[in-house]
Image: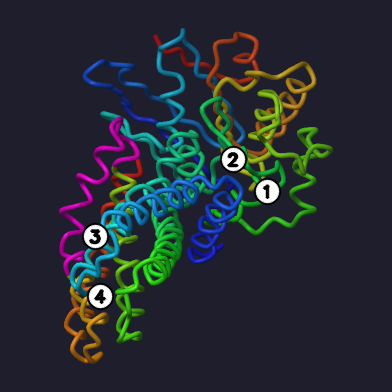
Amino acid sequence: MSTVAGTYGVFLKDFRSEIRTRYALNALFMFVVTAVTIILFALRGETPGPDVLSGMLWTVIFFSSMSGLARTFVSEEERGTTLTLQLITGPSIVYFGKLLFNVLLSLVLSVAISALYMLAFPGFVVKSFEMFVVTLVLGSIGLASATTIIAAIIAKASTKGTLYPVLSFPVLLPLLMTVMRATGMSLEGEPFSEALGQFQVLVAYIMVMVAGSYLLFDYVWKD
Amino acid sequence: MTGLRITVKGVTKEFNRRKVFENVNFEISNGHSIAITGPNGSGKSTLVRIVAKVLSPTRGEVRYYLDGVDGSDDVVRDAIGFVSPYLQLYDEFSALENVMFLNRIRLNSRRLSSADTEKILGKVNLFHRKDDLVRGFSSGMKQRLKYALSLSHSPAVLILDEPTANLDDEGIAVVRQIVREQTERGILILATNSAEEAAWCEREITLK
């Protein structure tokens, strides 16, 4: 059986497990609804500018990712199934399977939060839709690529909840600054070509994170 | 894998500078079996994990030779079937799904059909519960399902940690049969406290 089939197998296992247990989805849903509602009450009908709106959007995406994406490894550790996976398959297969699942979860999360923002905040009007979609997709993949390896690291720690955002924030800062800028540009309606530099940074970030994680994961995974 | 040989050389394991065991050496090849015995806390489970290559020794090495050639990690993983009380299954999946999903993830095994999986579950007397979620299984049934999972790829090396834990007489009889078949076609490594179980193997090493 090939590496691709094994990777798909891990993804499928996580996907079906999530559908049945709602382990991450319920936590994410509650966090997003609570965060957006608080922001809504705090604004009291005021309409912030594009930069503030894009910052608010990625703040909610960042913190909900923190509460959801770590679970892919933490749940294996808590259930004691890490040993099962270690015994039957290679580290790279586990890593890429989990990454794939986190990319999907992150994409669903970003799309859902964006849709909620569009409904809840009248000022959140996307004027350059293509730029917004590319930013959302690259931002979600970037978030998943960074948080997957951090989740693998913190899954073995006793202070998981605290450690995750603390470790993630410095690693995600370059990504967050870039996606906030690109989202702001899409809300202002700037032409697509203006954001190419931001997209290059995002693609480079994803490549560095995935390559680095692939090399590091072997050591993280084995006790 | 007829020419398989495992060598364990000078293996020592320490946790936070506490020595669990020191300088363990043995060699085993196809058609042979070995029991690792010792009192609670002597490191039997730790040693079998090291032999299964999911835990690194502090010093020493474990090597798998296939026809005299040092095997890669993928070859080793493919050669091993492992049953232990520490091994956990996915409670939200049925017995059939557990075996099928986990076998799909395995790198070098052929894909199991539903019929193959049902046959394996029949071997451990779980066929009638194949569609039930593992969440509702007793600890003995879970232990039997672990045997089904570990045998799903016909492993050349079967490593059993406390092989009859949680099992009733019927379950123990199934394990005896599995052990008999394994000693005929491959390698059996067994960690136990029980003298009766240790007697299933040709050789015994005792950890202090």
In space, the residues marked 3 and 1 are separated at their CA atoms by 33 Å
Judged by its main secondary structure, the magenta piece is: helix
Q: Is A113 placed above or below B181 here?
A: below
SS class of the residue under badge 3? Answer: helix
Residue situated in front as seen by the camera: A12 or B204: A12
Chain at tag 1: B
Q: Nearer the viewer, mark 3 or mark 2?
A: 2
Q: Residue at x 31, y 37 (%)?
A: A160
The span from disc 2 to disc 1 (Cα, nearest Å) is 9 Å
Question: Is A59 contained in the magenta span?
Answer: no
The residue closer to the viewer here, A8 or B190, is: A8
Across and down, in percent, residue A141 comes to 34, 67
What's the distance in space between the residues labelled 2 and 4, CA to CA? 40 Å
| Count of marks, rendered view | 4
SS category of the residue bearing label 1: helix
Tell me the tag on residue A212: 3
Q: Nearer the viewer, mark 1 or mark 4?
A: 4
Sooner in the amino-acid sequence: mark 2 or mark 1: 2
Amino acid tagged 3: Gly
Tell me the magenta residue range.
A154-177
Residue identifier under label 2: B90
According to the image, label 4 marks what residue? A183
Where residue B97 is drawn, which disc sits there? 1
